[in-house]
Image (tube, rainbow, N blue to C red):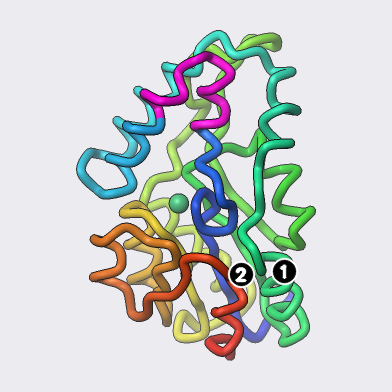
C-alpha cells in the first residue's frame, strides 16, 4: 500500500449513507419494522452488537439475491459524502469504510462514492436466497477499531493522523482508537463520548477538520 498523509474511516449506515441497509433488506422479507426497532436498540448500545446482528440477519432468511438490485437503488448517500471524499483525496488522504452492514451492498456503493478501501459483513446464502446467517467473523466494535489500526499501519499513517466518523455505539471503539473521533448524526451515547459532534445533515462539515 502506498503511504498517505492521513486516514478517515467512516461508518456506513446512517453515517456515509442515510439508510440502515439491513432495514431495506428486511423490507424485502416484510420484516422492516421489527428489524428497524432492533437496529435502533443496537445502535444505542443497549444490546450486544454481534448477538443482535445475528438475530436480525436471521429475519432476512428467504430474501432472494436478486432483491439486492432494488435495495441498492434505495440506498441514499449522505449529502456531501462525495465532496468530502474528493477533498480527502486532494489533500493526500485515504477514505475508508468499515461497516456492520454488508459487502453485498457496499461493494457497489463504496467505489461509486470514491472510497479507497472497505470492510463489512457477508450474508450467507444458497446461491438463490439468503439463509439467515452471517458468513464469517462479524464486524463488531473491536473489528472496526482493528480495521482502522490496520489500514493506518499499512500506509505508514500515525494514529494521531486518523479520523473516525460514526453514529452508533459500535463505532465508539474506533472513535477512541483514532486521533479524532467524530460523532455524525449520532446517538446520544455516542455524542457524549466523541471528541467532536457534527451533523446531522451534511458531511462537508468535516472538511475543516481534515489535516
Ligand atoms: Mg451507523
Up/down of 132 relative to 69, above or below: above
Locate residue 148, reporting x and y percent: 49, 65
Quadrant of the drawing holding the C terminus:
bottom right
Span shown in magenta: 23-35
Residue at x-position 75% and y-position 28%: 69
Local crowd size for mark 1, using a 10 Å CA cut-off: few (<14), some (14–19), many (≥20) = few
Q: Which mark is residue 1?
A: 1
Local crowd size for mark 2, using a 10 Å CA cut-off: few (<14), some (14–19), many (≥20) = few
Q: Residue furthest left?
A: 46
Q: Which mark is residue 99?
A: none
Q: Nearer the viewer, residue 130 or 188?
A: 188
Q: Are marks 2 and 1 in contact (CB under 8 Å)?
A: yes
Q: CA distance from mark 2 to mark 1?
A: 6 Å
**Is tag 2's residue or tag 1's residue first in the polypeptide sequence?**
1
Residue at x-position 70% and y-position 12%: 127
Q: Is mark 2 within 8 Å of ligand 1?
A: no
Residue at x-position 24% and y-position 70%: 192
Residue 179 left/right relative to 130: left
State whether the magenta stretch is mostly helix, strand or loop.
Answer: helix
Locate residue 208, reporting x and y percent: 57, 89
Up/down of 111 relative to 92, above or below: above
Locate residue 46, reporting x and y percent: 20, 43
Q: Quadrant of residue 126?
A: top right
Residue at x-position 40% and y-position 64%: 174
Please give the residue where the numbered disc 2 appears in the rendered image. 154
Locate residue 94, reporting x and y percent: 67, 73
Residue 55 left/right relative to 156: left
Amino acid at each position: 500500500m502506498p503511504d498517505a498523509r492521513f486516514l478517515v474511516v467512516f461508518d456506513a449506515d446512517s453515517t456515509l449513507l442515510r439508510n440502515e441497509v439491513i432495514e431495506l433488506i428486511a423490507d424485502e422479507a416484510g420484516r422492516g419494522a421489527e428489524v428497524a426497532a432492533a437496529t435502533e436498540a443496537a445502535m444505542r448500545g443497549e444490546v450486544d452488537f454481534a448477538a443482535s446482528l445475528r438475530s436480525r440477519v436471521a429475519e432476512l432468511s428467504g430474501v432472494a439475491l436478486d432483491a439486492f438490485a432494488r435495495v441498492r437503488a434505495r440506498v441514499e448517500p449522505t449529502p456531501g459524502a462525495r465532496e468530502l471524499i474528493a477533498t480527502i483525496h486532494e489533500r493526500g488522504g485515504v477514505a475508508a469504510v468499515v461497516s456492520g452492514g454488508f459487502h453485498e451492498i457496499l461493494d457497489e456503493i463504496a467505489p461509486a462514492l470514491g472510497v479507497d478501501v472497505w470492510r463489512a459483513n457477508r450474508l450467507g446464502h444458497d446461491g438463490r436466497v439468503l439463509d439467515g446467517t452471517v458468513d464469517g467473523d462479524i464486524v463488531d466494535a473491536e473489528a472496526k477499531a482493528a480495521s482502522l489500526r490496520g489500514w493506518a499501519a499499512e500506509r505508514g499513517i500515525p494514529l494521531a493522523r486518523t479520523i473516525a466518523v460514526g453514529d452508533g455505539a459500535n463505532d465508539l471503539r474506533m472513535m477512541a482508537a483514532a486521533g479524532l473521533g467524530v460523532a455524525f448524526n449520532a446517538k446520544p451515547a455516542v455524542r457524549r463520548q466523541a471528541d467532536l459532534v457534527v451533523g446531522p445533515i451534511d458531511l462537508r462539515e468535516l472538511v475543516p477538520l481534515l489535516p
